[in-house]
Image (cartoon, rainbow, N blue to C red):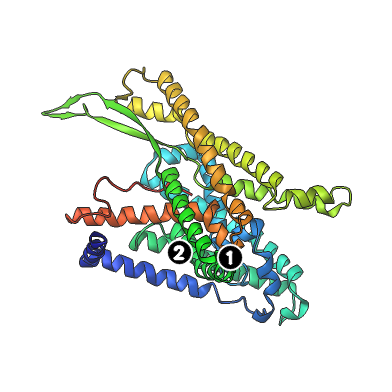
Amino acid sequence: MKRFIQTIKNIFKIEELRKRIGYTFLLLLVYRLGSFIVLPGIDASQLANLQGQASDGLLGLLNMFSGGAFGNASIFALGVMPYISASIVIQLLGILVPYFQRLQREGESGRRKMNQWTRYLTILILALQGPAYMANLRTQLPPDAFLVGTSFWYNAIATIILMGGTMFVMWLGERITDRGLGNGISLIIMIGIIARLPMALTAEIGEKLGATNGGLLVLIIEFVILYFVFIGSIALVQGVRKIPVQYAKRIVGNKQYGGVRQYIPLKLNAAGVMPIIFAQALMLFPLIFAQFDATRGLAATLSDYTGFWYNFIFFIMVVLFTWFYTAVTVNPTMMAEEMKKNGGFIPGVKPGRKTAEYLDSIMTRITLPGSFCLALVAILPALAMILGVNNQFASFYGGTSLLILVGVILDTMQQIESHLLMRHYDGFLKTGRLSGRSGM
């Protein structure tokens, strides 16, 4: 504890780090304030139905990523999800389309062009999601909740406000990344998740302490289990298989280059949280069967979040999506070509095709346990609810909430530690270094 307090003191001794932290907190405060500004023309006192709708399923995921702004009909209601969707599409195009493959190889200039394409695609997605959100508002809220009616011009103006809100949130994220601390977009998502923690924790404590038999003991056991779940999630995020790479010696003038051994860190969970997000989106399709009498029972079975069949199918889908997303995003052939181009080779493996096959076999072996661990994390909230944990607090036992929290916190701590070590202060750990997050 003494070492941790000394580390905090060292953080505030560094002027640049102190300014970055203050700047980050200021912009995050602006974002949180904007999450409670309701769209013009909507009665904020009649949003109960919308908040209830945004508690489960894909809409609950959208509400989480927007920090509750989705359920508040806020100007930031669409949050950063359109930007994340556009980033995923551009990332996939970087593997499938030769033009985007060339941009990836162009370094900083190519990255700027891809970021520009991401912004254009974000605007296109917003142009589709904005009217869809307004249509959802019309179905969830009573007519008198719209103080100026629901005419075409009102919907158009509200859509423009929603688009502007998301672009402003993106701008806040970019400013945090450039002048603040950590990845701005990831921090904005994390703040939205943490904002739900006090209410969920208060509800869980009140519920358990109100019990007559062993309430406090059960609460302590829940916290102990949550502690070990966090440890397991950190291991999943940071787990890597290091592949040794030897670089050949080169003599250029009077200087020697290469001749050193480095490592390729192949991640246990290279897919991040994306398989869980994809699986949650597809698990909403059984709701379509609820419209027909013959399949209403099937829809009810597949929509029970704590039911066996829902979680079994959800588990299998997360495993399959992990394999698919890893196969799409991790390209052993490209890695082997870059390694060969720079004069590197894996000891005992021939450069070129043999290296690509070797890397592919390693990724296959580590992706199998990684996919099962990720699927287990995905269904942990349902298991927690079955064991009596409050629905709100159970979401912190696994799923996207837990993985995003762990990943962003590790990434931010790594940046703080780099500032400390650069100025000859001790980091957060006595031995070793913090690793970055697995991505989102």
Label 2 sits on residue: 171
Helix, strand or loop status at disc 2: helix
Residue 176 on image: x %, y %: 39, 63
Residue at x-position 74% and y-position 79%: 149
Name the residue located 43 percent from the left edge and 69 percent from the top edge: 28
**Amino acid type, callout 1:** Asn
User: Circle 1 sits on which residue?
Assistant: 213
> Is residue 202 left or right of 433 when viewed as pictured?
right
* Residue that appears at 20% across and 24% down: 249
Point out residue 177 in the picture as x, y percentages from the top left corner. Answer: 38, 59
Left or right relative to 269: residue 246: left
In the rendered image, residue 374, in percent from the top left (x then y), is placed at 53, 43
Looking at the picture, does residue 245 appear above or below residue 131?
above
Residue furthest out toward the right: 293
Mark 1, secondary structure of its residue: loop
Q: CA distance from mark 1 to mark 2?
A: 51 Å
Could you tell which of marks 1 and 2 lies nearer the N-terminus? 2
Dot 2, crowdedness within 10 Å: few (<14), some or many (≥20)? some
